[in-house]
Amino acid sequence: MLNEYDISALLVTIKLASLTTVILILVGTPIAWWLSQTRFKFKVVIEAIIALPLILPPTVLGFYLLMTLGTNGPIGNFLELIGGSSIAFTFTGLVVGSVIYSLPFVVQPLQNSFGSIGKHPMEVAATLGASKLDRFFTVAVPLARSGFITASVLGFAHTVGEFGVVLMIGGNIPGETGVLSIAIYDHVEAMEYGQAHVLAGGLLVLSFVMLLVVYIFNRHFSIMRSD
Amino acid sequence: MIECKIKIKLDSFILDANFSIPDKGVTVVFGPSGSGKTSLLRALAGLEKTNNGFLKIGDSIWQDSENFVLTHKRQIGYVFQDTTLFNHLNVQDNLDYGIKRSSNVEKEFIDSILNLLGIKTLLNRSTAQLSGGEKQRVAIARALLIKPKILLMDEPLSALDMKRKQEILPYLDALHNDLDIPIIYVTHSPDEASRLADHLLLLDNGKVIGSGPINNMLTRFDLPISHGREATSLVEAKVISREKEFDLMHLNFSGGEFIVPDNRLPIGSNVRLRISARDVSLTKEKQIDTSILNIFPAIVDEMSPEGKAQIMVRLKIKEITLLTLITKKSAKILNLKKRSKVFAQIKSASILS
């Protein structure tokens, strides 16, 4: 049912989405925590910048990424200067693009979760002898559990579903940057509707299941927390 | 001693807390809502940061011009107003959270605290399975288990209904009697203050308006609590015998013997009596044909007018101080003056603790 091209696209997609999600949790957690705690005057500016990928056409984002990461772009230039090569049209470039593209889907749920904890549990933990870092990991993170689950699922699912960005900076190289969403497009272009159905249907079901998990878990979690 | 000199700018006023209080027993911080009680407690805990403050508890300095010891290094037990058990942990894990982060918490000590607060049977419950009173008891135990140098309690009963309050109060009495660390207890309830306090710190609009032993404070005419219909005084006494025939018990205090309805406290127990100024009347001669059992010779110490018709009289029964609220007319008939000799008839007294 799946040809070799489809399978490689599936593997690249899973690899990309997993790696992107891990990086996003690592990068997004401190950003979200900072945003939930800070009284910084220009916090809204930062929030708006992070939210940009929500409304920006992915091709716009992809275009600018191509301009900065490509051989003639500032980052591409810099990479070549230190002896590397441009990361446009590579898997690494794809990861960078995906991280930026899915950032709001991870930061926003985390920020909301951290914000809803309030400062009280953290103060209690401090009176019980927990240092700042200690109480972050033993109180804030467990209490924001639902936020982490939502963030991971949304970050993963959104990366799986991206098209415009990968088209611009990925270049659809099989086994390297060829992902599912582009494979579907290729099948449709070639009038292979049967193949397209399998992939599209598969993504539809997968996305639905992932969202279902998020909603079930959040509901369950909020019942557990009510007192 | 606990020495505190802290100034904090708050939204509507400046908290200017400059006082020293004993480092044992219960100090109740009393004042109307918004007088800065909670902020004071938070400052003691290091949760509100201030510059140029000074704070010393016993022999540890927590804040001076150079140092500010962070909350998690202060070794304080803090019981917050609303329950703040961690919902992601069960009761045992909540207790362990503090124990793990402190040193030398012996098993016997843990056992004694669990017994003191009666929570041994709750250890495996989740926090959602606890009643409001149980939650607060667990929170108090958790605060005590880190072997704090001081216990700070911020209106621990205010979130509870009357029944739950009655359930917790005996445990607070037990803390009062069994612990040798100082307790600072914030409340705006006169009942809790007169029941628990050894020492009273009065706060109004961010300023300390008085500080001293509880009964001195209750009967000081320069303070608002010694005025009005709610004015009371306290007498410390000890149960010495029972009168089975009438179901009464006799209490001994330094001014004589007090008779109250038996409430089954064992002989030898210390009790605190609260006597409302409205329940004390005065006579020149000792009455014989009267239903009042508790009559003591007293000396008028000071008088202070209360509105147009009444006058508050402070009496001394030996070294015990008592307030009585009478009419100005009665004072005139009895020809009351400073150092007049009278008899105080006490109609009723409630037993606290």
Image (cartoon, coloured by chain):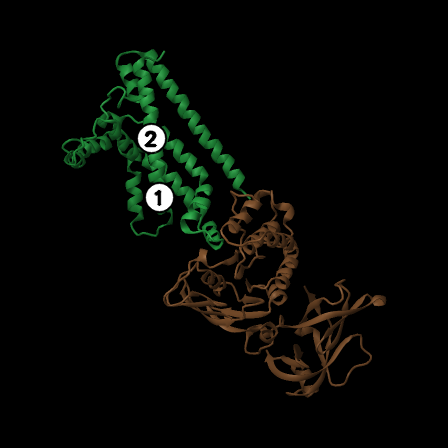
Chain colours: A green, B brown
Residue that appears at 56% across and 70% down: B200
User: From the viewer's perspective, is residue B307 above or below residue B144?
Assistant: below
Instruction: Give the label on residue A59, or none.
Output: none
Comes first in the chain, label 1 or label 2: 2
Circle 2 Cα neighbour tier, 10 Å, few/some/many (<14 / 14–19 / ≥20): some
Residue A212: where, in percent of width, then height?
45, 28
Which quarter of the image is occupied by the C terminus of chain B?
A: bottom right
Return the residue found at the far right: B245
Q: Residues within 10 Å of mark 1 (few under 14, many from 20)?
A: some
In this figure, which residue is indicated by the disc labeled 1? Answer: A30
SS at mark 2 in the image = helix
* Mark identifier at residue A19: 2
Query: Is A167 on the left or on the right of B145, as rendered?
Result: left
Up the image or down, A40 lies above or below B41; here it is above
Q: CA distance from mark 1 to mark 2?
A: 18 Å
Q: Quadrant of residue A14?
A: top left
Query: Is residue B227 in view?
Result: no
Q: Secondary structure at mark 1?
A: helix
Amino acid type at mark 2: Leu
Looking at the picture, tell me which residue is in the foreground, A130 or B196: A130
Measured as percent of width and height from the top left, residue B47 is found at 44, 58
| Protein chain holding label 1 | A
Residue B192: x, y in percent? 61, 63
Residue nearer the viewer, A80 or B176? A80
Residue B68 screen position, x and y as percent? 40, 62
Amino acid carrying label 1: it is Pro
Name the residue rendered at 29%, 18% in the picture.
A183
Residue B307 in the image: above or below residue B171: below
**Who is closer to the viewer here, B48 or B72?**
B72
